[in-house]
Image (cartoon, rainbow, N blue to C red):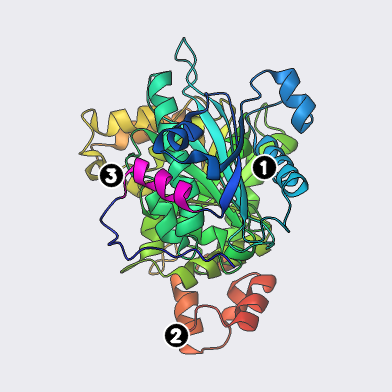
Amino acid sequence: MAVIEEDDIEFQNIISVENKTYRINLNKNIYGTFAEIGAGQETVRHFFRAGNPSGTIAKTLSAYDKDFSDAIYGIQDGRYVTEKRLKAMMHYETGLIEERISREKHPNKLFFSYANTVATIDWAKKYKGHGWLGIRFQTKPKEDYSEIVLHVQFHENNAIHQQISLGIIGVNLIYGAFYQHENPKKLLQHLFDHLSTDKVEIDNINFTGPAFKEVDNRLMSLQLVKNGITEAVMFSPDGNNVLPATLLYKRNILTLRGSFRPVTLVNMSMYEKSLELFLNERKVEKDNTVVIFEITLNNLKGEGEIDEKDFLARADLLCSLGQTVMISNFKEYYKVVEYFAQHTKERMGLTMGVSTLKDIFDEKYYRHLSGGILEAFGKLFFKSLKIYLYPLKDPETGEIITSENLSVHPRTRPLYNFFKRNGRVVDITNFNEEILHIHSRHVLQMIKNGESDWEEKIPEKTAKMIKEKNLFQEE
């Protein structure tokens, strides 16, 4: 039986692209197909140059013509740079290897198919370029296949440079699959060997199969943001990673930011009441609207390093309520709006509480911008964006604070009044005053202290899950 072992190499010692390909070529058991569409055969080129490629490369092809591609891999919605097309390519090619290579003659072979389907930057430089890459591979002979599938966004303004980056990341992916699969976090970081996030960005990745049976893809998404590989990732209510561009494309977007530790009755009331108002806006239809519950990296860190168990607890609770979750590295709200604006020109809404809105109008958060708060607000109030404001009950006076009696600094008061007069700040009026005292941090402390009555402050389904899984308990 073939055994693949990782050399005792220090993490900081980055192996050259040539040495990675040469090592794979020298392994007599690694054997597979390269199928690359749209940007040339940039990955397999490295394997040909490294020497001894005949023991690794079963076949290489580029079904560049759409009719040929459809004839080989089938028709998938008439689109070619998609995850569905990529998986069809990988499954088809590994099927051919299994069919044509005798296991009796080659009992120790580890089959693989590497594929990419890519669109590089267009001549007018209107579209930056993006693509899907993946590898379907075995770590043991006759074992079921494991897969790594990822989506990249190119940031270079030259097609040739993008092709070079594609070839490098392809080599890193193949090498990582065979020699680093036991440590997916390490594999993920090494995908950027000899590259930088200025050149290429990974905004979606999924690990499946026997080699990754212990991997939670939500944690891998978290690593993408934590390591600065991308600014935001998303996963759907079923817990699977989703490509933000696909989910957000030409959609109306309503966003609710919070710690959700845990999600409370107030959080759900904010969501439900603001969604009612948002759906009443002109040109906003329910079928073309997506609601995003956003957790920032700062919210995850709290007072220290990110607690992965705590992160999964919050994710599980939100997903169980049918919500789509976004983890982002955006501290300021205008960056969230800028990010969404890359994918849609439709309506946007931000749901927030009074304290958050007050912070938004604080100049100190925009000192790093040359245009200060005016520059930030030019980006924040994108087109017809509106803020849906949930009231605050003053714990000392009992006064209900809304946009009408909110106190902001005198210097920014004229700016606040301008946006208020123009209908950009909308009060949520049909709220339940009896729940305004509920705060996530208080509920969390009650859970940790083993106090009673905390169940009454959060959704019933959430309370049940917290108790069943012992979430947010002190170690």
- Looking at the rendered structure, the secondary structure element under dot 2 is loop
Q: Amino acid at mark 3?
A: Asp
Q: Amino acid at mark 2?
A: Glu
* Residue drawn where x is 44% and y is 86% of the image: 475
Of 454 and 413, which appears nearest the observer?
Answer: 454
Label 3 packing within 10 angstroms: few (<14), some (14-19), many (20+) = some
Sequence-earlier tag: 2 or 1 = 1
Q: Is residue 22 magenta?
A: yes
Picture disc at residue 90:
1
Closest to the camera, between mark 2 and mark 1, is 1
Q: Do callouts 3 and 2 mark residues in contact (Cβ within 8 Å)?
A: no
Instruction: Determine which residue is flagged by label 2.
Output: 474
Sequence-earlier tag: 3 or 1 = 1
Q: Is residue 357 left or right of residue 177?
A: left
Of 194 and 81, which appears nearest the observer?
Answer: 194
Closest to the camera, between mark 3 and mark 2, is 2
